Image (cartoon, rainbow, N blue to C red):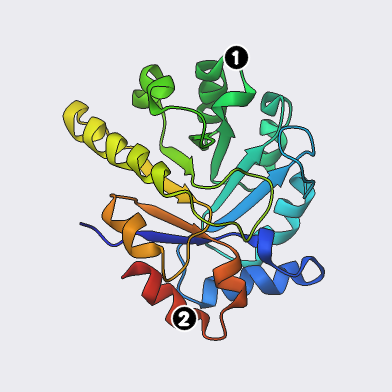
Amino acid sequence: MTTPLIAPSILSADFSKMGEAVSEIQTSGADWVHIDVMDGVFVPNLTFGPKMVSDLRPHAALPFDVHLMIEKPDQLIPAFAEAGADYITFHLEAVVHAHRTVQMIRNLGKKPGISIVPSTPVSFLEELLPFIDQILIMTVNPGFGGQSLIETCLDKIRTLVAIRQERRLSFLIAADGGINVQTAPAVRNAGTDVLIAGSAFFSARDKKQLIQELKG
């Protein structure tokens, strides 16, 4: 089992100190910056848009994984690409023509990811797996930070690991929601490549130590 990447989510940061938060993610030894974009429609919360990504880009050299929890993501994908996203992850449940959306992200020179909520089965991703760089499994119902991990979602990760090996594919598997020092071992053991942690990271006194504990 490989050591997972750690991607702190700025959803749990102090919004008045976002530049400092992103710099802190970089100095902690984390691997990615996870940016949750919410529109108040697809999920019951509202966060930030492309300008936030653009303004934060100079504060860290780490990859930016922009997670679009929004309706009609195609309308905003070009703006987030231009703002400095590296990975652009959209929700399967928010689009009809998911393959077209994947192609759009790839054509913009970015890495496409697809996320599914706890109620969506892995089988819905079957036709898309060869074309994407990341699958993000939501281990909570999206919209707010600080929730408890839904353990049955780990079965989806195990299923994806088996499919990836069987079909010789190379997508990363990420998990987001309720990940902390207590839950990380089970998430890692399921075969997760990217652990996304928000509340756990920004509430930790020693963030470097937390990153090492999450990596296991």
Disc 2/disc 1 C-alpha distance (Å): 41 Å
Task: Indicate whether 87 appears above or below 212.
Answer: above
User: 6 left or right of 177?
Assistant: left
Quarter of the image that includes the N terminus: bottom left
For disc 1, the marked residue is 96
Which residue shows up at 75% across the image and 58% down it? Answer: 55
Q: Residues within 10 Å of mark 1 (few under 14, many from 20)?
A: few
Which residue shows up at 63% across the image and 68% down it? Answer: 22
For disc 2, the marked residue is 208
Task: Indicate whether 179 appears above or below 159.
Answer: below
Q: Specify the amino acid type for callout 1.
A: Val
Rendering coords of residue 216 (x, y %) = 31, 70
User: 216 left or right of 174?
Assistant: left
Secondary structure beneath dot 2 equals helix
Rendering coords of residue 35 (x, y %) = 63, 52
Q: Residues within 10 Å of mark 2 (few under 14, many from 20)?
A: some
Which residue shows up at 63% across the image and 44% down it? Answer: 142
Task: Indicate whether 75 appears above or below 79.
Answer: above
Q: Along the line of sight, which residue is nearer the eye, 77 or 1?
A: 1
Rendering coords of residue 201 (x, y %) = 55, 71
Task: Indicate whether 184 appears above or below 129.
Answer: below
Which residue shows up at 76% across the image and 41% down it? Answer: 44
User: 66 left or right of 179?
Assistant: right
User: Please, which residue is most extreme toward the top here?
Assistant: 97
User: Please, which residue is most extreme toward the left here?
Assistant: 166
Secondary structure beneath dot 1 equals loop
| Of callouts 2 and 1, the N-terminal one | 1
